[in-house]
Image: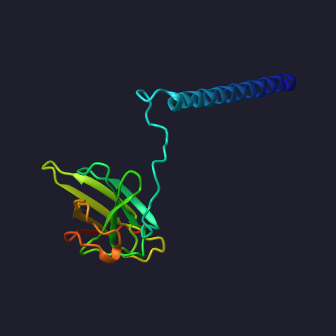
């Protein structure tokens, strides 16, 4: 009787070993296949690729934009991008072109920059463009509320100042205040 139980036990262990080995082989083959498929996405022609390969087109040229934390492409002005610093530099928006050249600086009226983290551009159904700025950072967990500022997107002209010291103000920001649930 003991011999029969021992044989059954050995067979079960062998079966488990074979199953584990087969699973390992399937896993290894699937990883290799996924890697090959991803490599093909990157080498495919641009008509069929999900994304174009990265390309450096320029560098930020504004000395004042030294802690950039957000970037949004304008929905109304071609080749205009909006950026802002993370915190401590005041409530300023920087317009840059696709090469990183400075197109102007604006002070956001009715806003403070305690810890801006993101920016988004939006075009409504009437064709009006807006910028949403997220005052949502709180690394030290000291802010009781967060805010999202909404402003009409400033229009770029050739005469815009390149420095926060001379920056014109935007229209007054609408403020959406909120509080994250307690963790």
* Rendered view: 93 above or below 81: below
Which picture quadrant has residue 132?
A: bottom left
**Nearer-the-camera pick, 182 or 70:** 70
* Residue 29 coordinates in the image, percent (x, y): 64, 26
Which picture quadrant has residue 130?
A: bottom left
**Nearer-the-camera pick, 101 or 37:** 101
Furthest toward the left, the residue is: 126
Q: Residue at 25% of width from left, 51% of height from top?
A: 77
**Left or right: 13, with 133 as reference point:** right
* Residue 88 coordinates in the image, percent (x, y): 42, 76
Q: How many numbered marks are there?
A: 0
Q: Residue at 25% of width from left, 72% of height from top?
A: 168
* Rendered view: 159 above or below 81: below
Furthest toward the right, the residue is: 3
Q: Residue at 42% of width from left, 65% of height from top?
A: 62
* Residue 26 coordinates in the image, percent (x, y): 64, 26
Q: Quadrant of the C terminus?
A: bottom left
* Residue 170 coordinates in the image, percent (x, y): 23, 69
């Amino acid at each position: 009787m003991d011999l029969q139980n021992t044989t059954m036990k050995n067979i079960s262990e062998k079966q488990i070993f074979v199953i584990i080995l087969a699973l390992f082989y399937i896993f290894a083959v699937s990883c290799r296949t996924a890697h090959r498929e991803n490599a093909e996405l990157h080498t495919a022609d641009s008509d069929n690729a999900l994304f174009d390969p990265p390309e450096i087109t320029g560098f930020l040229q504004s000395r004042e934009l030294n802690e950039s934390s957000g970037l949004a492409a304008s929905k109304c002005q071609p080749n205009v991008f909006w950026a802002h610093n993370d915190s401590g530099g005041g409530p300023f928006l920087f317009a840059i072109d696709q090469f990183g050249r400075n197109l102007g600086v604006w002070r956001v009226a009715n806003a403070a920059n305690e810890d801006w983290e993101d920016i988004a551009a939006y075009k409504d159904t009437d064709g009006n463009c807006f910028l949403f700025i997220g005052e949502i950072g709180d690394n030290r967990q000291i802010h009781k509320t967060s805010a999202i500022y909404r402003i009409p997107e400033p229009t770029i002209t050739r005469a815009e100042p390149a420095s926060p010291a001379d920056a014109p103000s935007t229209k007054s920001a609408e403020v959406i205040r909120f509080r994250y649930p307690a963790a």
